[in-house]
Image (cartoon, rainbow, N blue to C red):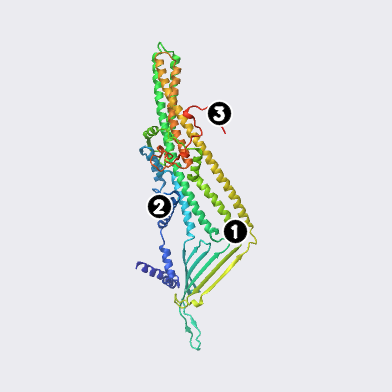
Amino acid sequence: MAAQSGSVAFVRRTDKYFPGWAQAARLYSGGAGGIALLLLLAGCSASHYRKSADKEVYGLIQQYDRSVLGRTNDFSIATRFSDRLPDEILPAELIEERAATNRRVLHVQEALRLAVANSREYQAQREQLYLTALSLTGARYNFRPQFAADSTATIQGTGGEAQTARVHSRVSVSQFLRTGGRLSVALANDLLRYLTVRFAPNPGGGPPVALGNDSAINTITVNLTQPLLRGFGKNDPTVEALTQAERNLVYAIRSFSLFQSQFAADVVQDYFNLLAQKTTVRNNYTNYLRRVETTQYLDARSVDRVRRSEVDDARNAELNARIAYVNSLAGYLSALDNFKLRLGIPISDVITLDDRDLRDLETAGLLRSELNRDAAFRLAVEKHMDILNAIDRFEDAKRKVRIAADQLRPGLSFASNASISSEEPYDYANFDFDKLRWSTGLTLDLPVSRLRERNTYRSTLISFEAQLRSLVSTLDNFRNRIDRALRTLEQERLNYLSRLEALRVAERRADMNQMLLEAGRVQIRDVREAQDALIQAQNNLTTALVNYLGSRFDLLLDVGILLADEDRFWLRDPLAERLQDSQRGLPPLHMPDDQVTPPDHFLEPQL
């Protein structure tokens, strides 16, 4: 009722200031054009369109996750700002948020959770996947019924008098066909009102006869076009665009899955690197305290038993230990800030890393990978997302050649259309199908000039060979990466064993020299060297353990079997349950019984 009152008021105002427009408005509001206007004014909110896009895109990602990866995960690009209007988010709010100080104790799983929730890099990758799926919705839209509606109102007159008012409305639906054709159906509605009375001569010679004041005609039109040779079916550019958009989403799903694994491995590796640095800081501080004790001890004995030069030597070592401690502490704090950046949390947050994670890693020990190089490469070809994408892009290049070759063929198209209009006067449904107008025919386009198409075809052949080389290069690079990863993993294992033994030796040497110093049987230089060797051995052992973890991550990532979505994946061995006996083997740098093997075994291998 309120809407009706508003329209009446509008008519009165327009009638006052624009004579004739009021009558046109009445005509418009009484016909199909009025319905179109109301639909236009009502419209859908921006929020509706956003929700509609999210629903379709998330559904696509779930569908492709299931078909490509065999599983589905919750996926959303929503953030804490997503439900707010952009104008409501002010720089001052962000400044205050980043300046706030939170205190938290981090363990590695919490670090992963924070990274997934807050990392700007992770969010950017999510959004890239979303945009790829969004592009696919556009390509699919071409093959759905596409509805359109428009309405135009005009008024004509002479001088200050309005004579006619017309409303032309059109509703149509069209659709691309998988065969390369296009079908469209349109309904046009034309309403004409004469604002002045029309008269026609009287056949009997009497006074002129008044004609009807209104006229309304509906016209239905159907059009069909279908290529029969060039561009038929899968060779149609629009069909190919849909196929490529579908392939692109497959690639994006794989790439995002690979990114998730790489990202999780990087966060875990960074976390344990920080714990190793934290251990180094503590070791350096302990070393500094030992140097202080040694200096104080020698200073007390410098009265009659120790030369002053030895006290100065100890003091110099103490200062060097202090410098090492301060530098390692500063380096750790800087690395911790960089880690906050990776997690996406404010730099002002005060975080403490849980040392128990490092102890758990030490307890788990070195998880060996008894995987021979050929089996590792075969696994990578089956599992690694980059290799699978490279293979499929090679197939894309083949398809492009086929489509470009199709464009060199003659064109033969079938076209048909039919239309029928209702009869006057004001009767929308008064159709006389005996007056249906139609046409049908064939159009032949002979390949008289195909220079552009020829050049495109030749370019696609070159692109195909480039893609072939790219695939071969990808395979060779992965073979190289896997061999290097296997060597590096064994290298880190052997180094860890050596560093473990070096620590035992350094501990015995430091204890022995300290006792000999108290007995006056060694110089302070020997004690200092023993203490230096001990602190270095302690730091090296922790670093070697963390380096081994990183090398194992690299191998598992290169093979494509790092299961980063499993709980505490860094302590698990995904190869243990996967490998068959035929896939097991010795690493390229294997040394029997962990004993040093002469170089000729590796430098001059038996062929």
Q: Amino acid at mark 2?
A: Leu
Point out the residue furthest to the right here: 448
Q: Which residue is mark 3?
A: 600
SS class of the residue under badge 1? Answer: loop
Please give the residue where the numbered disc 2 appears in the rendered image: 85
Label ID, residue 210: none
For the N terminus, give its image quadrant. bottom left
Quadrant of the drawing holding the C terminus:
top right
Circle 2/circle 3 CB separation < 8 Å: no
Q: Nearer the viewer, residue 96 or 168?
A: 168
Which residue appears farthest toward the top when viewing the image?
304
What amino acid is found at the position of numbered circle 1 in the picture? Gln
Which numbered disc, 2 or 3, marks the residue closer to the eye?
Answer: 3
Which secondary structure, mark 2? loop
Place of residue 321 in the rendered image (x, y in percent of width and height, measured from the top left): 43, 24
User: Viewer-proximal residue, 186 or 504?
Assistant: 504
| Residue 322 visible at all | no
432, above or below 377, in the image: below
Position of residue 413 measured from the top left corner of the image (x, y, whole percent): 57, 65
Query: On the rendered structure, is 452 left or right of 347?
Result: right
List the residue tagged with mark 1.
Answer: 407
Tell me which label, 2 or 3, sits earlier in the chain: 2
